[in-house]
Image: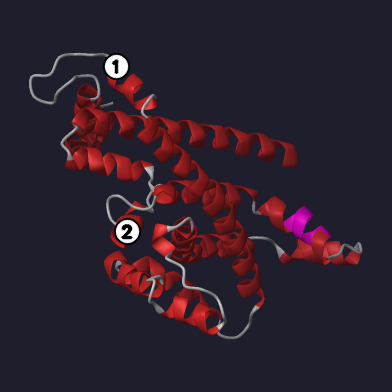
Amino acid sequence: MKQKKNEIKIALFFLAPSVFGFLIFFFVPFILGLYYSMVDSPIRGKFVGLSNYYQLITNPVLLKACYNTFVFTSISVPLNIGISLTLAILLNKIKYFRNILRTAFVIPLVVPVASVVLVWQVIFDIHGPLNYLLHTMGFSNIDWMKTNWARIVVVVVYLWKNLGYNMILFLAGLNNIPPEYYESAEIDGAGTLRKFFSITMVCLTPTTFFVFIISIINSFKVFRETYLISGAYPQDGIYMLQHYMNNMFASLDYQKLTSAAFIMAIFIYLLVVVLYRLERKIHKVIN
């Protein structure tokens, strides 16, 4: 009994720095944010309950930002999963230069965002190389970041940034599939599509759900690239939730900022819970 108490004390001693850091940098800011979201002013504010949340959900600017975020996520996440899975399958079959190609796809993860954004700004400038190429082909110049094409530009930047990471995850999942499954399927006369849907996709179900969740979370992080490319007030189609919260922070409107942050956090939490429950049900059906 005494030895067990000593082990608990030692465990608590080693856990203390992590617990202290969690309380200081996560739990306390969370409580303060919740408090600010329910007062009318961060300094000597009066308690207003859910009034700030009601003002937000009836704010046309926030609703527009929510709509743009939903559209962007609905487009970018399926593309991200589909392209990264295709690349993983192709790389898994390549014998030569496999490691070099893997490294090439992972490089965007380690390149500083600010330096890459300068390249994208040059490429998509109205007088940039892309418009010059279109002009030589007989097309007129496109102002990429000030028209409806801006959403496509942001999707391209998002895919460029996240494809490599998801591809590595799918490669790990593919390498864990026993080759005997495919050999048995070939003996039974199964074709390529049959093996893909009955073996590959079934075995990749946990990986696919994990990639799906990570892709959704990363789609909410595209603000950095969008902000650096087009500023705090971009084209109407790419004004995201993060733009709204950033502008509220710039105007020192902490009540709306924290309220919007909690709304987004609750939405992401509920979405992840639903996806995990769906994954468990599918896993039970498969097994």
| Residue 29 lies in quadrant | top left
Say the numbered circle drawn on residue 151.
none
Between the C-alphas of marks 2 and 1, the distance is 32 Å
Q: Which residue is mark 2?
A: 230
* Residue at position x 18%, y 42% in the image: 250
Which of the two residues, 43 or 64, is positioned nearer the viewer here? 64
The amino acid beneath tag 2 is Ser
Q: Position of residue 51 (x, y in %)?
A: 29, 16
Mark 2 burial class by Cα count in 10 Å: few <14, some 14-19, many 20+: some
Q: In the rendered image of this protein, does residue 56 appear above or below residue 123? A: above
The residues colored magenta run: 194-199
Would residue 260 be counted in the magenta stretch? Answer: no
Q: Is residue 265 visible?
A: no
* SS majority, magenta: helix
Which of the two residues, 61 or 220, is positioned nearer the viewer here? 61
Taking the view exactly as shown, the residue that stands out farthest to the left is: 44
* Residue at position x 78%, y 64% in the image: 182
Q: Position of residue 33 (x, y in %)?
A: 22, 29
Q: Which residue is mark 1?
A: 51
Element class at badge 1: helix
Q: How is the image coloured?
A: secondary structure
Work out which quarter of the rendered image holds the N terminus and state it. top left
Q: Nearer the viewer, mark 2 or mark 1?
A: 2
Mark 1 burial class by Cα count in 10 Å: few <14, some 14-19, many 20+: some
Among numbered discs 2 and 1, the one appearing first in the sequence: 1
* Residue at position x 46%, y 66% in the image: 160
Q: Position of residue 118 (x, y in %)?
A: 30, 71
Work out which quarter of the rendered image holds the C terminus and state it. top right
Q: In the image, is 176 to the left or to the right of 54?
A: right
